[in-house]
Image: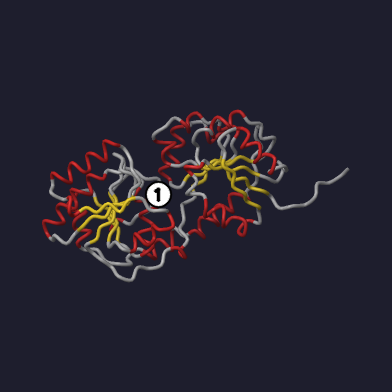
Amino acid sequence: MNELPLRRPRLAFLLIRSLDHFAQDLIAALPEETGWDVRPFHVANLADLDAALAWTDRPDLDALWFEFCWPPFPRLIAETDFAGRRVIVRVHRIEAMETPHVAQTPWHKVQDVIVVSADMAARVRHAAPGLDRSTRLHCVHNGLDPRRFAPLLNWSPFRIGWCGLMTLRKNPMLALQVLFNLRVADERYHLHVCSNGGETLAIDSFFHLARHLDLIDAVHIDGTLPQHAMPDWHARNGVLLHTSLHESFGYAIAEAAAVGCDIAVLEHMGAAEFWPEATRYGTVDEAVWLIRNAAPHRWRNHIAQHFSLARQIAATAALLRAPVLAHAS
């Protein structure tokens, strides 16, 4: 009987072109940590998935990682015979909270599902009540590479940062209310907004309220920045003002804290899992107090200790080393 030649296990990272930004650090770091070969595949249809299946030609060794539970991935999972290959799916906030995609995914064909918070784990289980009968659910916190976040040198307490899509969920109008109250005390406070668009209602409402509150000259739109430029943008701010109604993690918050900004985080569902009580606010007055009492470099160690890329990679490597569940394909 001929034995198959020895080789390293292979992990095919299946990506959607517009949703591949969270995967790059994992793809780069996992080979050294795990001893696996890792290759990205941008997948839009069955033919693209077939290329990944052809590369992962040892079902006894290899695995496929679907980054996002987002179309076309749920349909492709349902239509594909994985022939014993291990299937891993990472679920992000939007799929579990704002779409039916988690509920409609055939979890009996998936061995492992990954989320980034306990709050998200509960939401995935609520959306797919039978998931635990067939699939292991893992909570692996996101991580930052500290080499990308040099500590800021010149701290400006009056420059407030806000970043994200202009959507109602991101709640940018609250930032204007906080800014208005800050400027009642000291007109040196300004808001710098980094955003690449969003919902028409949220954008129009933001600028309408800015005009109504006479804040147009105190709001600076820094526009869209590539991911590699975000550390420098954070480093120019004194405080990141977070106003979102919900986050699975809040990557921008961690980025800001990593460079040395102070942070003011709206008390949203799941916030306590990541952000100390001293950073969270529930009212405009509390947000103003946090910002007026801000200091640099308060939370850099918190990020380094709890949300380093090394921790995320180690936890992901442990997941890959776990025994494979026997599954229908």
Compared with residue 183, is residue 167 higher up or lower down, i.e. above or below? above
**Residue in the image at 31% along x and 40% along y:** 167
Callout 1 amino acid: Phe
- SS at circle 1: loop
Please tell me how crowded label 1 is: few (under 14), some (14-19), or many (20+) other residues with Cα within 10 Å: many
> Going by the image, does 102 lie left or right of 165?
right
Question: Which residue is farthest bottom?
Answer: 153
Where residue 65 appears, x then y in whole percent?
Answer: 58, 43
Tag count: 1
Q: Which residue is tagged 1?
A: 249
The colour scheme applied to this rendered structure is: secondary structure
Q: Residue 237, how many percent across, how many down? A: 29, 61
Q: Which quadrant: the N terminus?
A: top right
Q: Which residue appears farthest toward the right when viewing the image?
A: 1
Q: Quadrant of the C terminus?
A: top right
Horizontal side of residue 61 vs 204, given as left or right: right
For residue 270, side relative to residue 211 (left or right): right
Q: Position of residue 204 (x, y in %)?
A: 23, 39
Residue 229's image quarter?
A: bottom left
**Residue 190 visible from this viewpoint:** yes
Residue at image x 49%, y 50%? Answer: 140
Q: Nearer the viewer, residue 89 or 131?
A: 89
Q: Residue at x 29, y 36 (%)?
A: 200
x, y (%) of residue 45? 58, 33
Which quarter of the picture shows residue 295?
bottom left
For the question of whether residue 113 can be seen, the reply is no
Q: Nearer the viewer, residue 25 or 115?
A: 25
Residue 329 versus residue 223 in the image, above or below:
above
User: Residue farthest to the left?
Assistant: 184
